[in-house]
DNA sequence: CAGGTC
DNA sequence: ACTGG
């Protein structure tokens, strides 16, 4: 069991995993599916209408995982810089829609799109002294019209969100089943959905389906690989990856970083964005 | 140009 | 191609 006080809430929220969070005074208030969470570092307090231990992956043997990925020097430095950073286990539907919305967008804009969806399709819920809209239910989003989705400023992602919601509503996508499948099979299934490519599938797999070998390769990850690992992954560049190059690179990455590669990616991503002074939520 | 995808 | 900075 890990120490409860070793979680750095701000670092964890501000690491590109979650978007529907706001800092109100000293508290971070966020939405995970139908749940509302209120997290505070000082004095330390974690409150949730749902299961906070599940959200924070308290079942992970963090000591073992960090020790495992620390064999790489750059990852070891990244862990030191962002101590208390945790991987989060998100509501799968929210995670799925969130990262479909993430394509070719900024963190601030992704947050805005998701807030619009919650305001329009979510249910008002009270928790503590706060009242906010939860994330839309599958059925609600599946029944949304294109115009309603376009009103949420989703742009070309509107049709992806519509199709993706219909797929879940019809059980073509079943998160409980995907969770049981191995990484490759789950990824293949997710990629059948319009709007989900390799990178988005990896984010969904890592942040909501317990696939710790998922290693989302985006622009930042490519820069990281080029900057720190060019001798290990020979043909990396800044150019967009083709389908096959992504898969080949991912294979090599898992061989190098190991079964907890996704944890490595999270620390590296956080480190490099902070280094370049990129803003979060 | 933005944590990509079709 | 949407959209916002």
Image (cartoon, coloured by chain):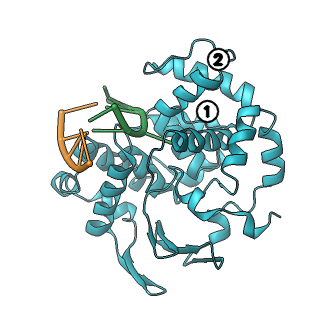
Chain colours: A cyan, B green, C orange
The image position of residue A256, as x and y in percent, is 74, 26
- The circle on residue A233 is 2
Disc sitting over residue A242 in the figure: none
Residue A170 in the image, given as x and y percentages of width and height: 40, 53
Give me the residue at 65% from left, 48% from top. Answer: A180
Q: Label 2 lies in what chain? A: A
Mark 2 crowd level (few <14, some 14–19, many ≥20, 10 Å Cα): some
> Residue A46, relative to residue A241: is it above or below?
below
- Kindly report the distance in space between the C-alpha atoms of the residues bearing marks 1 and 2: 21 Å
Question: Residue A190: in sight, yes or no?
Answer: no
View extreme (left): residue: A147
Camera-side residue: A6 or A140? Answer: A6
- Residue A235 left/right relative to A141: right
Q: How many marks?
A: 2
Residue C5 placed where, x, y %?
26, 48
Q: Residue at x 71, y 33 (%)?
A: A74
Image quadrant in which the C terminus of chain A is located:
bottom left
The chain under label 1 reads A
Whether residue A250 sits left or right of residue A150 in the image: it is right
Alpha-carbon neighbours of circle 1 within 10 Å: few (<14), some, or many (≥20)?
Answer: few
Q: Which residue in the structure is indicated by mark 1?
A: A184
Query: Which residue is at 46% across, 30% downward?
Result: A219
- View extreme (bottom): residue: A129
Residue at disc 2, secondary structure = loop
């Amino acid at each position: 069991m890990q120490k409860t006080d070793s979680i750095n809430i701000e670092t964890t929220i501000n690491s590109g995993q979650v978007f529907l969070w706001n800092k109100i005074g000293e508290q971070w208030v966020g939405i995970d599916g139908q749940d509302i969470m209120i997290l505070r570092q000082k004095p330390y307090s974690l409150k949730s209408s749902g299961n906070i231990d599940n959200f924070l992956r308290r079942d992970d043997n963090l000591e073992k995982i960090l020790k495992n990925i620390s064999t790489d020097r750059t990852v070891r430095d990244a862990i030191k810089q962002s101590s208390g950073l945790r991987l989060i286990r998100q509501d799968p539907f929210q995670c799925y829609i969130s990262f479909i919305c993430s394509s070719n967008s900024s963190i601030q804009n992704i947050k805005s799109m998701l807030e619009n969806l919650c305001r329009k399709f979510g249910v008002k819920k009270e928790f503590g002294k706060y009242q906010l809209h939860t994330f839309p239910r599958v059925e609600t989003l599946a029944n949304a019209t294109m115009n309603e989705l376009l009103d949420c400023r989703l742009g070309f992602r509107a049709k992806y969100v519509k199709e993706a919601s219909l797929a879940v509503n019809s059980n073509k996508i079943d998160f409980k089943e995907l969770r049981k499948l191995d990484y490759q099979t789950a990824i293949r299934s997710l990629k059948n959905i319009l709007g989900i490519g390799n990178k988005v599938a990896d984010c969904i797999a890592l942040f909501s389906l317990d696939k710790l070998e998922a290693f989302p390769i985006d622009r930042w990850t490519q820069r990281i690989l080029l900057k720190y690992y060019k001798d290990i992954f020979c043909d990396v560049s800044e150019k967009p990856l083709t389908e096959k190059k992504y898969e080949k690179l991912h294979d090599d990455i898992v061989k190098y970083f190991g079964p907890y590669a996704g944890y490595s990616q999270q620390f590296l991503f956080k480190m490099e964005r902070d280094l370049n002074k990129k803003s979060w939520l």
